[in-house]
Amino acid sequence: MRWTNAICGWALVMCLGGVWGCSSQDPSATSDNPSAASAQASARQETPQQQETPQQVVQRFLTAVKAGDEKTAQSLLTKKAVEETTKSDLSISPPGSETAEFEVLEAQVRGNEARVLSRWTDGPPDARRTDEMLWVLKKDAGQWRISGVVIKVFPDLPAVEFNFEDAQQMAAQERFVAEEFRRRSEQATADPPAAQQSVPQTAQAPSQDNKVR
């Protein structure tokens, strides 16, 4: 089904424990643990200090996601996003994908906020799929950092925004996407296949007795 492909790209991964899913990490890695907090601070300090453009930040973030580099990916979030995801036991766990390809496209910058469009393509050779994502960035300590993403999950519904700085909003969006995915899957299973059209019989040649003499 196309819905598995649609959400597997990003949103379903978020809901089912991938990039933004529930963490299975050891409890000692919570925000209350000094070593965990120190690791987060270290990850942020190791990022380049020069002023990067929003596109460059998204480029580095997606490169980290593709490589499964959780440390770099987390360092490119806003401080508030790191705090919220850690507090709510959400963790960035990029699955990594050698077959993925992505493009970082145009950016819209307004003051201390920016939005960057990207395309992510992945999947088996005979079923590659491309999804567009609109990344939301903010200035954080003088650097552009990611605070959320907007994804067009279902083609007949509005795009879904995941606000990484609001754990409750993220959880609500995850529930919505998971429930909608479940509903559509059940509906597709319940709907009977289209009735096969009866094939009209071809006209038979008149029998020998009925031939016009």
Image (tube, grey):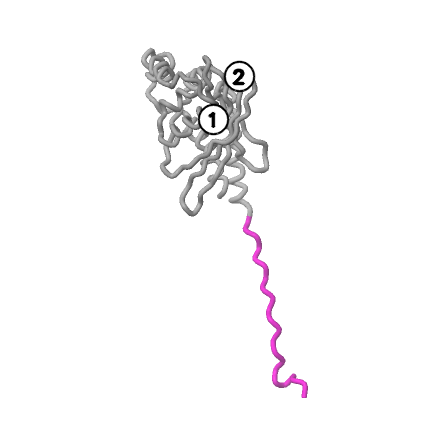
Question: Does residue 185 show up?
Answer: yes
Circle 1 is placed at which residue position? 55
Label 1: element kind: helix
Spot the residue most to the front: 50
Amino acid type at image mark 2: Asn
Q: Earlier in the sequence, mark 1 or mark 2?
A: 1
Q: Residue at x 42, y 37 (%)?
A: 101
- Of residue 141 and residue 169, the one placed in the foreground of this image is 141
Amino acid type at image mark 1: Gln
- Of residue 170 and residue 127, the one placed in the foreground of this image is 127
Q: Residue at x 60, y 66 (%)?
A: 200
Spot the residue most to the bottom: 213
Q: Is residue 206 magenta?
A: yes
Q: Is residue 186 magenta?
A: no
Residue 20: x and y in percent read 43, 26
Question: Does residue 173 show up?
Answer: no
Region of the chain picked out in magenta, as a range: 192-213
Circle 2 is placed at which residue position? 112
